Image (cartoon, rainbow, N blue to C red):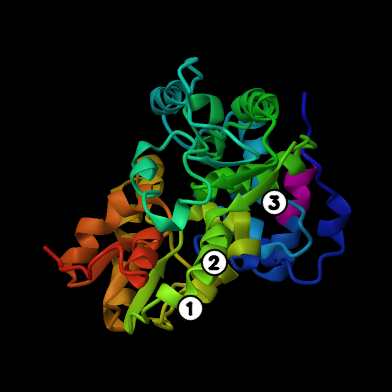
Amino acid sequence: MYTLQFDINHCKTCPTGDCLVKCQFMSLDKTEAIKEMIKIAEGKDSPVLHDCVTCYGCEEYCKRGNHPFYLITEQRQAKGILTAPRAITRQWINIGEPRGKARLGQVKGKVLSFGFMPELLQLVRGRLFEDVMPSYVFGQEFFCNVVYIHFSNTSIIKERLPQVLENFRKLGVKEVVCMHDECYGAFASLAPAYGMEVPFRPIHYFEYLYGRLHDLAKELRPLRIKAAYQRPCSSRLSHDTHHFVRDILSIIGVELVERAYQDENALCCGDILGMNYGYELKNDVQSRNLDDMAEHDAEYCVFNCSACQNVLATKVAKRGIKPIHMIDLCKMAIGEKPSMEVS
């Protein structure tokens, strides 16, 4: 069985306790934060195990790469501290179960991975992806399973993720462009944290887009619009790629409005928080986030994750803000997609 690589000494010598001090859903000072993380690492109970809402934020706040959220998840499961009713957890686990029905394109050394999100298949048409399509994989056999850390279940990930990695290895691919942020987090953060060998180079699709926009520089038309970026929870696992948001928007002439809830202080879409912890939390997170976008005069809300877009698109539009996926925004900049109207 794979074991989380966690060093309690990093906590004992931590100068800030930022993993919990910066948490937007709990209030702890430096001394309390360090004390509670040490307790968790020693297998003891802690209020943190009961109050964590699974926003993933502490994975980014810890600058020592010590994976505090993975540890919290491990200890929750060990102690039977559930974040959702068993029936809901089981339903989600069943959705991701391998079915032996994966769809493969003309697989080459570089491949697009859609995980198990069919809506992503519609986004890769056009010049932005012509250098790699139709080399792609889709299906539960290539689904990263990271979502189950929301449900305090690392055992299912340790069971399935190695097989996902083996499925890629059998294809002989050298580079995997992850079209879902969470899949990149699985290959670049979660798998190494558990000592799993990743037999390819994972590439976040933001990095890929950034390169393609440079390739198509002569076709770019500055959009001259103001936008807010909706950062998903999974981005906390791939925070090394977050700089590409500003890099991409700068290339295509989009002004990223400076607001309260962005970068390290971002709020997620709130959907799973509501599923696990109730409507009041979900409504609070979404209301603060949307108010923040509107108050800073964002014309567009740019989405990274299609699931976030499904949750917030209508609510964003009701505020007079146009919802758009990052890929479609880039298509606008090269003239493949017209400017949007809010319906």
Disc 3 + disc 1, Cβ < 8 Å: no
Relative vertical location of residue 200 with respect to residue 125 in this rendering, above or below: above
Disc 2 + disc 1, Cβ < 8 Å: yes
Q: Can you identify the residue that label 3 sits on?
A: 68
Q: Is mark 3 on a helix, strand or loop?
A: helix
| Amino acid found under the numbered disc labelled 3 | Pro
Query: What distance separates the C-alpha of mark 2 from that of mark 1?
Result: 8 Å
| Amino acid found under the numbered disc labelled 2 | Tyr
Q: Can you identify the residue that label 1 sits on?
A: 251
Query: What distance separates the C-alpha of mark 2 from that of mark 3?
Result: 30 Å
- Location of residue 76 in the rendering, given as x and y in whole percent from the top left corner: 62, 36
Disc 2 + disc 3, Cβ < 8 Å: no
On the picture, is 164 further left or further right than 250? right
- Location of residue 169 in the rendering, given as x and y in whole percent from the top left corner: 70, 29
Magenta segment: 36-43
| Amino acid found under the numbered disc labelled 1 | Ile
| Label 1 environment density (alpha carbons within 10 Å; few <14, some 14–19, many ≥20) | some
The quarter of the displayed image where residue 331 is located = bottom left
| Label 3 environment density (alpha carbons within 10 Å; few <14, some 14–19, many ≥20) | many
Q: What element carries label 1?
A: helix
Q: What element carries label 2?
A: helix
Looking at marks 2 and 1 on the same chain, the residue that comes earlier in the sequence is marked by: 2
The quarter of the displayed image where residue 210 is located = bottom right
- Mark 3, mark 1: which one is toward the viewer? 1
Looking at marks 3 and 1 on the same chain, the residue that comes earlier in the sequence is marked by: 3
| Label 2 environment density (alpha carbons within 10 Å; few <14, some 14–19, many ≥20) | some
Q: Which residue is drawn at 44% across and 58% down?
A: 128
Residue 58 visible somewhere in the drawing: no
Q: Can you identify the residue that label 2 sits on?
A: 210
Magenta span: predominant SS is helix
